[in-house]
Image: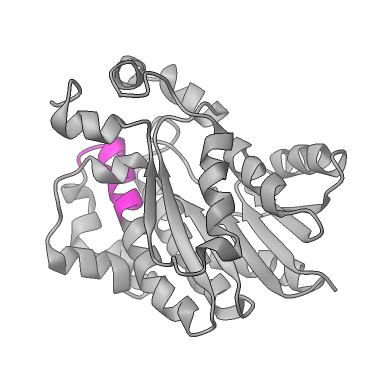
Amino acid sequence: MKDVVLWTGAGQIGMAIARRIGFGKKIIVGDKKFDNAKSIAKIMTEAGFDIEPIECDISNRKSIINLIKAGQKYGEIATLINAAGVSPSQATIEVILKVDLYGTAVLLEEVGKVIKRGGRGVTISSQSGYRMPALTPEVDEQLACTPTEELLKLDVLQPKNIKDTLHAYQMAKRCNVKRVMAEAVKWGERGARINSISPGIIVTPLAIDEFNGIRGDFYKNMFAKCPAGRPGTADEVANIAELLLTEKADFISGSDFLIDGGATASYYYGPLKP
């Protein structure tokens, strides 16, 4: 039996993280598009990793449970890497909330029930969650603590209160961070830790869709005027994730790490200020 890594979202960021911490473990990679999971599993296998692809739609609880069961055939679930999601240019408001908000909440909940003692997890959020005005303490608590099957019924998430797909995405990512805080308490009862990372513009196929979408000029302007002067790379995100998924970060749980080249700082206090 081996320690098992559950990895959702077969993309560049997830792979960069899995390569850092996955050797010697059994990796189960799930993606809604099975061909994506198979392709990335082939790359990892040819690099010496023990990995199995599976179809997984994180917006579906049964699909998440099937992912967990696939991993448990090989050992205890020791690590979660959640890099699954859709972007504002890829999906409707309803799909963004179902996948990025509800799906992430269910995944953290279900993995939290079975995570190995001393286990660790990271979920990929986004700098977008930092671009909204502060929500009320009551709404923050609702996003953090509402039972998962009630989340999408919250008034703040109803269509009349969501302006567009970008707003839906921002709400989802704000919820991710709050959900991680609440889940950290539950994971802690098993001696496990969960944190989130909020990347800025990272060069991935998803980001390239954004660059070529209706908000392309907005994104290009953003990294041109941020202190770093460029977009980031998946490996730079993995640098933080690697720390969070090792014993060096055993005192860190329920936290979010903004890694955006200073774009959010520029948005509030620099040339990106609206």
| Residue interval drawn in magenta | 163-174
Q: How many marks?
A: 0
Residue 226, given in percent of the width and then of the height, sits at: 30, 23
User: Compared with residue 52, is residue 105 higher up or lower down, i.e. above or below?
Assistant: below
Residue 82 visible in this rendered orientation of the protein: no
Name the residue located 37 percent from the left edge and 31 percent from the top edge: 261
Residue 218, given in percent of the width and then of the height, sits at: 29, 19
> Horizontally, is 97 left or right of 233 in the view?
left
Residue 58 within the segment the image draws in magenta: no
Q: Quadrant of the C terminus?
A: top left
User: Compared with residue 107, is residue 46 higher up or lower down, i.e. above or below?
Assistant: above
Task: Report the residue that reaches farthest toward the bottom.
Answer: 189
Quarter of the figure with residue 222: top left
Frontmost residue, 16 versus 56: 16
| Main SS category, magenta section | helix
Task: Report the residue that reaches farthest toward the front.
Answer: 248
> Horizontally, is 49 left or right of 79 in the view?
right
